[in-house]
Amino acid sequence: MLTQLFLLAATVPVVLGATYSLTDNYVGPSFLTGFTHEAIADPTHGRVNYTDQATALAKNLTYTSSDTLIMRADYTTTLSASGPGRNSVRIKSVKTYTTHTVVFDIRHMPQGCATWPAAWETLESDWPASGEVDIVEGVNDVSPNQSTLHTSPNCTMPDGRTQTGTVAAENCDTTVNGNAGCGVKAPTTNSYGPTFNANGGGWYAMERTTTYIKVWFWPRNSASVPSDVKTSGSASVNTGNWGTPTAYFPNTDCNLASHFGANNIIINLTLCGDWAGAVFNSDGCSGDCVTYVNDNPSAFANAYWNIAAVRVYQ
Ligand SMILES: *[C@@H]1O[C@H](CO)[C@@H](O)[C@H](O)[C@H]1NC(C)=O
Ligand SMILES: *[C@@H]1O[C@H](CO)[C@@H](O)[C@H](O)[C@H]1NC(C)=O
Ligand SMILES: *[C@@H]1O[C@H](CO)[C@@H](O)[C@H](O)[C@H]1NC(C)=O
Ligand SMILES: *[C@@H]1O[C@H](CO)[C@@H](O)[C@H](O)[C@H]1NC(C)=O
Ligand SMILES: CC(=O)N[C@H]1CO[C@H](CO)[C@@H](O)[C@@H]1O
């Protein structure tokens, strides 16, 4: 009996979740008012020209219908080597969020050599002091497909966390390990890129409290996706029913309250740049990344996000 009790206690997550109510339901056209297009120079030095909303809509790089947001890189224009990069999109929520839960219902993410898509949260004007949570990010169609925190100093993650993913690194401090952050790799092969897309995508969710940050991923056909995640426009979610997260970032060796402030939700797609460009050849892509982007527009036909919804619960 004692053994049973002990086993039971040992398998229950240390911190259970909570119930949250829907506060922002970004679907279709509401992305055009709830998010801004950031026509900025890519801070990660990608071969892109981030377009403003008017340009993105006029060129159909951003497209919405009642239940769909499409955002893509241009896939018809051959670029001049001396001109700007390939037109692409980067959007940022108008609102900022502190403690909250967010669900991304994604049907397709950008794929192809040179692509570097990311769905993440930060406050650009106060980075890294306000923290950064990369919910899904990868390059050139390959792993790590990981979830990562990037913070100011004195924030590390402990061994032995209750999570399904595998640890890539434990120090979240941007000033160490070349800003690799403390990442956890998703265990499922269909969590990123072509396999994610072939499977109809799925749901990424992130819960941020003052004591932990958790990230979950469920493939589209998963038998274990919670009903409140699966239901479009679900009025509330109970993260306590969501099971073991893919990534669990507790506050045991990191004061999350002091390392994370109000963050925007950001979705971007760059090409080449500091990460995708640096590992282009070792990821199985041929030639020079920038030349590839300039000369091969049709290679970017599948470099698009198709997002059903981003739902924020507080
Ligand atoms: C680059 O983006 C800017 C801002 O949206 C836009 O005005 C410009 O036309 C784009 N460049 C090209 C070559 O399309
Ligand atoms: C714009 O893009 C959407 C989504 O990819 C597509 O369905 C639509 O046909 C495109 N419109 C034009 C005018 O090309
Ligand atoms: C995602 O990462 C896992 C390892 O954590 C790996 O097995 C899988 O192949 C990766 N998926 C893709 C599409 O790269
Ligand atoms: C580092 O964080 C711990 C809590 O995780 C705190 O007790 C300690 O004072 C912090 N040290 C510094 C130098 O900020
Ligand atoms: C995919 C991509 O462009 N990701 C980057 C978006 O921009 C921020 C910085 O502004 C980077 O940290 C991301 O890696």
Image (spheres, rainbow, N blue to C red):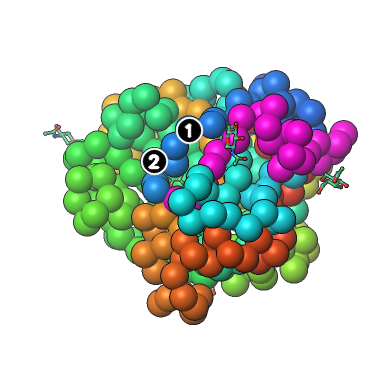
Q: Find out whether the residues at labels 1 and 2 contact each other: C-beta distance under 8 Å.
A: yes
Amino acid identity at mark 1:
Ile
Q: Quadrant of the C terminus?
A: top right
- Residue 193 located left or right of residue 48: right
Q: Is residue 71 left or right of residue 294?
A: right
Q: Magenta part of the protein: which range? A: 46-68
Asked if residue 48 is among those painted magenta in the image, a careful observer would answer: yes
Q: Which of 148 and 33 is in front in this view?
A: 33
Q: Relative to 195, is 214 above or below?
A: above
What residue is shown at x 58% (from left), y 55% (from top)? 79
287 up-or-down from 215: above or below: below
Mark 2 highlights which residue?
Answer: 43
* Residue 214, x across and y down, in percent: 49, 46
**Horizontal side of residue 50 vs 3, given as left or right:** right
Look at the image and tell me whether residue 193 can be seen.
no
Q: Residues within 10 Å of mark 2 (few under 14, many from 20)?
A: few
Q: Residue at x 57, y 50 (%)?
A: 86
Cβ of mark 2 under 8 A from ligand 5: yes
Q: Nearer the viewer, residue 27 or 156?
A: 27
Q: Is residue 231 left or right of residue 246?
A: right
The percent coordinates of residue 47 (x first, y second) are 48, 52
Q: Which residue is drawn at 33% across and 26% down?
A: 126
Read off the residue under disc 1: 40
